[in-house]
Image (cartoon, helix red, strand yellow):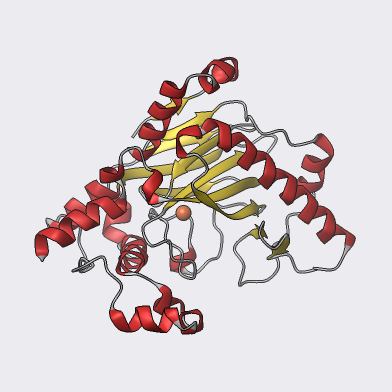
Amino acid sequence: MQLVTIAESALSTTLQSPERLRDICASLEAGDIVFFPSTPIHIGSEDLKFLLGHQQVGGAYHKNIAYRPQQDRITGFSDQKSDTSRRLRGIMKSYSQAVIEFLRQFLGPYQAQWKVDYASYRPEEEQGRDLTLRKRNDLLHTDAFPTRPTHGDRILRFFNNINPEKTRNWITTETFGGLLEKMRAGKINGSAVPLPSSMQMPALKRTLSGIGLGALAPSLKRSPYDEFMMRFHNYLKENSEFQSNCPKQHWEFPPGSSWMVYTDMVSHAVLSGQFALEQTLIVSRHAMVAPEKSPYGVLSRLAATRE
Ligand SMILES: [Fe+2]
């Protein structure tokens, strides 16, 4: 896994080269992290000041403050009706729009074949957070959404470290394909997650989803792909031997930087850092420049050989 660094001075020439942009998409899909030492996203100084002054996430249920662009609404902030909440919503809306506008150009090869998912504000210090094991950010994992199945589409996340002083510190280990191989070869302790025998949704689930009952329980909406990815996420987090002994790369993202990565493929953990913004895109698996490398591609191949 490598860092693909895009310096501020190289950004405009990069944006003008379709070949270079395609290479960048291919690097992301191979599990690299695209890193902007100086963020391409403008965040006004008054907005920054406001964000840094509001650290409180509302209640134990929410990990972060989330902004839902489709509904123009924030969750995870306790005081929904106040001026503070309205201001926060406005800032998150501008941030979300700025990131999407930038990625429309920067990820031009995808031709915006994506769903704009939530943006988030992460105001709490990550080191020593009191979260349940499956919600912990400091344990290595690949992302899967329990209530928002992707059916093989990709989870791409764009981050900003808005902390004026402190780096945001990540570790990563191998990407999805490598970890899956190790699990299958019995090189990771713990009981392996069964591979999907087919990528097709079972008929009963399809029917229930089709008549609107899928919304009753997230697991009814999950495809075999989502089911596997969710269990794989838990398997990695619950495996303390793997967490302690796997090879690790350390990354320090400085104040004012941005980075993006396919978090469904790159196993990652946040060790420390406070004050980050993030926007998630669910990129169509059909838009990939190297679909065979995606978790869906890898699992499909394995499912096909088992039939
Ligand atoms: Fe994650």
Identity of the residue drawn at 43% across and 49% down: 263
Q: Is residue 274 visible?
A: no
**Percent of width and height locating residue 61:** 61, 72
Residue 235 falls left or right of residue 33? left
> Residue at 50% of width from left, 84% of height from top?
216
Quarter of the picture containing the N terminus is top left
Q: Going by the image, does 305 lie left or right of 290? A: left
Across and down, in percent, residue 127 comes to 55, 52
Nearer the observer, 18 or 171: 18
The quarter holding residue 75 reads bottom right
Name, please, the residue furthest toward the right.
83
Q: Nearer the viewer, residue 138 or 223?
A: 223
* Residue at x-position 30% and y-position 52%: 295
For the question of whether residue 219 can be seen, the reply is: yes
Residue 15 sits above or below residue 60 on the image: above
**Residue at 46%, 76% in the rendered image:** 218
| Residue 163, quarter of picture | top right
As drawn, 234 above or below 67: below
Asked which quadrant contains residue 233, the reply is bottom left
Quadrant in which the C terminus appears: bottom left
Task: Indicate the position of residue 85 as horizontal and vertical percent values.
Answer: 81, 60
Residue 178 on image: x %, y %:
23, 46
Callout count: 0
